[in-house]
């Protein structure tokens, strides 16, 4: 049976991990490659690098990070952030990334999904959706630019279109839950997961192992992503997995 | 030297790095001579079956891979590379494969998520030097099509995704893995190491 995946996300700026990381056993806690290798040893199922560099140079540095990471770890990893063209995708995939996450650029130019899937295969294309509940609609709206700009697009419609265009997976972030540590947005995750037939990674709100159990069972998610709880060592990936296993969840 | 066959399909860097980490020399190559001279060869691949076969044909590598396989030296197909070993696939129309193993590649059909993406548990269906002494565990899959070998004796391991799914095939010195051993943690690396040591032993 397919295992539920636990995925840590690293924010990287100009080649350095930005969110404060306090691992004592790392030589250089700011080095994404070293942190990636540590998460691999801790049995993370995949990794996501989110490049938040604002400059061209910063993004060029990411290619080097990807190349070094690919030689160090034995699990798949996704790179997202600032990817706006098929050439950008090719550069990162050639450097050793397994999947490419696209968000704002896909909203601006949905053909990017279609073209990327055609050229590299659907399994490489992860469409990231930042969604927030719109009370007037009674459903969720897609936001871009790291959650700053509302688009007027319904999240469930966009999820279906992303799939139709060839996305292999969705990375769904609830802006309502993000940062709360009160748990994933189960309603949103379930609504999206039931609207599509591709895997959905839930993101935003993870605070403990129970939250992962909930989003797998009630939210129908295929994977759960978290950043700060792992980086700040509030809980380790191994602990989350041990607890999930004890609750009968199938994890690696 | 282990030849990583480069025919323009996908992530060769990770495979070649994994081979090097295991202490073997890896060469990413599209040269038929280099492939034929290698002690072992790996046919990786992500993307669409039809595109892959067209690339192999246009680069002249289809004949090289067939000649290499006929030489009896160890060949490992990974993911799409495994599927290419079979006779044909129904991915975007029917396409002929390398025909090194009898059988077909078909799409997952049913009320479940496709691609089959993530970590799934292996079950060894018969003994093989590829995993003798290894315990079956989780490896990383990502695919929308799966292989149906015609001869039961070619099937070495399966995984369960709403049905038994071909995970490892083998016949003589020809092997295929549907999952990505280079992305499958310790077990994946152990399986890759076995293949490499089989190649070294000749």
Image (cartoon, coloured by chain):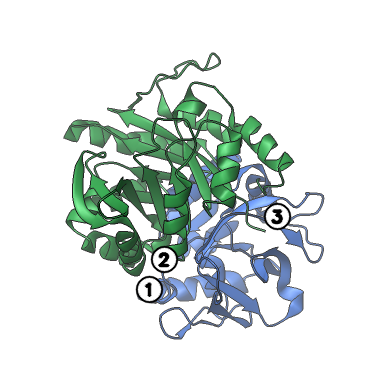
Chain colours: A green, B blue
Q: Secondary structure at mark 1?
A: helix
> Of callouts 3 and 2, which one flags the residue occurring earlier in the amino acid sequence?
2
Badges 2 and 1, same chain: yes
Q: Residues within 10 Å of mark 2 (few under 14, many from 20)?
A: many
Which numbered mark, 3 or 2, is in the foreground of this view?
2
- From the viewer's perspective, tell me whether residue A204 is left or right of residue B136: left
User: Residue shown at 47%/55% (left/top)?
Assistant: A190
Q: Quadrant of residue A57?
A: top left
Q: Which residue is mark 1?
A: B51
Kindly check if marks 3 and 2 are in contact, taking CB atoms under 8 A apart as contact. Answer: no
> Pointers 2 and 1 in contact (CB under 8 A)?
yes
Work out which quarter of the rendered image holds the C terminus of chain A and state it. top right
- The answer to whether residue A176 shows anywhere in this view is yes
Task: Tell which of A118 and B7 is nearer to you.
Answer: A118
Is B142 left, or right, of A79 in this rendering? right
Q: Closer to the observer: label 2 or label 1?
A: 2
Q: Quadrant of residue B41?
A: bottom right
The residue at the point 18 percent across, 58 percent down is A109
Q: Residue at x 22, y 61 (%)?
A: A110
Residue bearing mark 3: B198
Q: Secondary structure at mark 2?
A: loop
The residue at which mark 2 appears reads as B47
User: Could you tell me residue A35's position as x and y percent?
Assistant: 48, 27
Q: Residues within 10 Å of mark 3 (few under 14, many from 20)?
A: some
């Amino acid at each position: 049976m397919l295992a539920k995946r636990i995925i840590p996300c690293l924010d990287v700026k100009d080649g350095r991990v930005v969110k404060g990381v306090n691992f004592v056993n790392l030589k250089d806690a700011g080095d994404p490659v070293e942190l990636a290798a540590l998460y691999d040893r801790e049995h993370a199922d995949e990794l996501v690098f989110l490049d938040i560099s604002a400059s061209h140079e910063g993004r060029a540095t990411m290619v080097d990070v990807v190349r070094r990471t690919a030689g160090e770890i034995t699990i798949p990893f996704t790179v997202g952030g600032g990817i706006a063209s098929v050439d950008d995708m090719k550069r990162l995939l050639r450097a050793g990334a397994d999947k490419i996450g696209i968000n704002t650029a896909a909203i601006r130019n949905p053909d990017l999904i279609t073209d990327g899937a055609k050229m590299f295969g659907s399994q490489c294309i992860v469409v990231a959706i930042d969604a927030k509940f719109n009370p007037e609609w009674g459903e969720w709206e897609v936001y871009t630019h790291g959650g700053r700009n509302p688009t007027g697009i319904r999240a469930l419609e966009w999820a279906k279109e992303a799939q139709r265009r060839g996305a292999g997976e969705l990375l769904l972030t609830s802006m309502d839950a993000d940062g709360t540590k009160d748990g994933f947005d189960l309603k949103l995750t379930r609504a999206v997961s039931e609207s599509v037939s591709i895997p959905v990674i839930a993101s935003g709100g993870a605070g403990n192992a129970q939250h992962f159990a909930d989003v797998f069972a009630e939210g129908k998610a295929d994977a759960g992503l978290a950043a700060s709880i792992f980086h700040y060592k509030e809980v380790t990936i191994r602990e989350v997995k041990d607890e999930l296993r004890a609750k009968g969840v199938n994890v690696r | 030297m282990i030849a990583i066959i480069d025919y323009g399909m996908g992530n060769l860097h990770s495979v070649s790095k994994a081979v090097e980490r295991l202490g073997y020399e890896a060469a990413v190559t599209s040269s038929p001579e280099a492939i034929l001279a290698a002690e072992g060869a790996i046919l990786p691949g992500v993307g669409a079956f039809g595109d892959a076969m067209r690339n192999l044909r246009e680069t002249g590598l289809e004949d090289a891979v067939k000649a290499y396989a006929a030489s009896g030296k160890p060949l490992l197909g990974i993911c799409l590379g495994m599927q290419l070993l079979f006779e044909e696939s129904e991915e975007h129309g029917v396409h002929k494969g390398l025909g090194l193993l009898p059988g077909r590649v078909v799409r997952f059909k049913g009320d479940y998520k496709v691609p089959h993406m993530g970590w799934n548990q292996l079950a060894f269906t018969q003994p093989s030097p590829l995993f003798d002494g290894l315990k079956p565990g989780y490896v990383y899959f990502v695919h929308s099509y799966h292989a149906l070998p015609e001869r039961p004796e070619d099937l070495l391991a399966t995984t369960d995704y709403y049905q038994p799914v071909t995970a490892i095939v083998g016949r003589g010195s020809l092997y295929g893995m549907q999952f990505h051993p280079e992305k499958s943690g310790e077990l994946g690396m152990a399986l890759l190491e076995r293949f490499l040591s089989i190649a070294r032993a000749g």
